[in-house]
Image (cartoon, grey):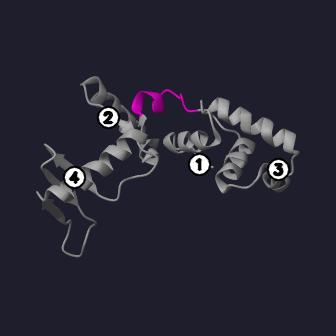
Amino acid sequence: MADALADEHDRAHLRELTERGAEVRIAATALPHETIVIDRRVAILAGLDSPAGREYTLTTAPALVGGVYALFEAAWETATVLKAFLHGDRPRLDRESRRVLRALGSGATDETAARELGMSVRTYRRRVASLLHALEAGSRFQAGVRAGELGLSG
């Protein structure tokens, strides 16, 4: 979804919405369907374009509406507030930091990751500590979650 904000017109539109009181968050990945939930009792899903045109599914089935709403809530909770996203509160990661982030995500031991990145274990651990600080994370797991929330690719 962050790619959609490459256009200044889109960013301006979202800023205007927030100025009018809307809450806007940016998710690292897009949801598979456009979705409208009304009073947690009705869900409307806009499907992919088919040969017949755009398809819509409307449901009032409590289990389906509840599932769709739970998916929305999960996406909302992990998304970044628009103001933080646009004001550059996301840390700027250089090429080496992104390589270390990928290594963290791979689950490799420090020794293996350091060897694969061509650095000493001490340097690797220092880079990991720097990433944790930059991402305001208390653990390696939190760093991965935070990087995902901020749309930072590894």
33 with respect to 52 (left or right)? right
What residue is shown at x 42% (from left), y 44% (from top)?
27
43 with respect to 131 (left or right)? left
Specify the label residue 114 is tagged with: 3
In the rendered structure, which amino acid carries the disc numbered 3? Ala
Q: Which residues are magenta?
A: 81-90
62 with respect to 107 (left or right)? left
Q: Quadrant of residue 98?
A: top right
* First-in-chain label (1 vs 3): 3
Residue neighbourhood size for the residue with mark 3, other residues' Cα within 10 Å, grouped as few (<14), some (14–19), many (≥20)? some
Q: Going by the picture, which residue comes out furthest to the bottom?
A: 51
Res 44 visible: no
Residue assigned mark 4 = 66
Rendering coords of residue 115 (x, y %): 85, 54
In the rendered structure, which amino acid carries the disc numbered 1? Ser
Secondary structure beneath label 1: loop
Q: Quadrant of residue 46?
A: bottom left
* First-in-chain label (4 vs 2): 2
In the rendered structure, which amino acid carries the disc numbered 4? Gly
Q: Nearer the viewer, residue 105 or 89?
A: 105
